[in-house]
Amino acid sequence: MEMYKLNPYHLDDDGGGVDLDLPTCMYKLPNVHRGAADAQSSGVLRDIVINASPSEVPLSLLALHGLLCEQYKVLSSVHVHSSVQNVPSKLWNCLGEGNHCRSRREYQLGFTLVWKDVHKPQMKFSIQNMCSIEGEGNIARFLFALLGRGYDAVTSTQIDNWVDVAIFQMRKGSNKEKAAVLRSLNSALGKNPWVVGVDLTLADVVLYCALRQAEIASFPANVQRWVKSCENLACFNLALKLLK
């Protein structure tokens, strides 16, 4: 004798049971691509706060700050944490000369860089509701995503691969590894004007900055042409000044 009976959670051959409307994902997240753009109308400033060591300047993040400024109204500021001393004066102005709007409500994004004694860069976005993102490559991926440029799976994979190559081989690899990256990069640039296709992507931003910080004396022909194309873009201006 049954204590109670439940209807089946599936349709049987006779059409009995319950037809459930199952979700297509485990949970939903707000659209970060539209979040910054919508912030101005809602009056909420979305804050990006990055901690970085002045001994290892994350140039790619400064270049991405330049790209964000081309698309959004960005409230930029630089601070020094008590854990570091004697920060070079040029690092105080690494985000430009500052902003002139009177109210925070007139901006869409807040971009705060804190020079701090940290092992690797750390970032928080809208601080109270998001965990920290660590590593220059991961932060760069997040910042570039705020630009809202979508790619198919193949292109996204290629971009991700080049970002890892730039961070782990060009920035931190041996001379042999750096030479191998240059050969691969030269080959890729023989087919397209930019590293992945016909438009600037995150791969170009991170690779260019890593290449410059690696202080390589000379470049193959295709890489040299690409370097000049990068340096013609305004987003790299502040990064170039820090290298002088």
Image (cartoon, rainbow, N blue to C red):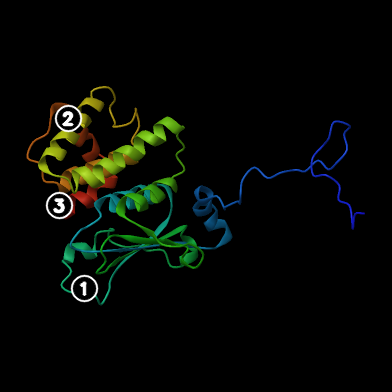
Identified at 18% across, 49% down, the residue is: 172
Q: Residues within 10 Å of mark 1 (few under 14, many from 20)?
A: some
Q: Residues within 10 Å of mark 3 (few under 14, many from 20)?
A: few
Q: Please, what is the three-letter code of the amino acid marked with disc 1?
A: Val
Q: Are marks 1 and 3 in contact (CB under 8 Å)?
A: no
Q: Where is residue 6 in the image (x, y as percent from the top left)?
A: 86, 50
The front one of 215 and 239 is: 215
Report which residue position mark 3 lands on: 243
Q: Which amino acid does label 3 sit on?
A: Leu
- Front residue (pair 47, 25): 25
Question: Which residue position is annotated with label 1?
Answer: 84
**Sequence-earlier tag: 1 or 2:** 1
- Nearer to us of marks 1 and 3 is 1
Q: Quarter of the image holding residue 174?
A: top left
The answer to whether residue 189 is seen in the rendering is no
Residue, disc 2: 183
Q: In which quarter of the image is the N terminus?
A: bottom right
Q: How far apart are marks 1 and 2 (CA)?
A: 38 Å
Q: SS of the residue at dot 2?
A: helix
Distance between mark 1 and mark 3 Cα atoms: 21 Å
Residue at 50% in and 64% down:
105
Secondary element type, mark 1: loop
Q: Which of marks 3 and 2 is in front?
A: 2
Q: Which mark is residue 107?
A: none
**Vertical relation: 63 (above or below) 220:** below
Residue 116: image x %, image y %?
26, 69
Q: Tell me, yes or no, if residue 208 can be seen here.
A: yes
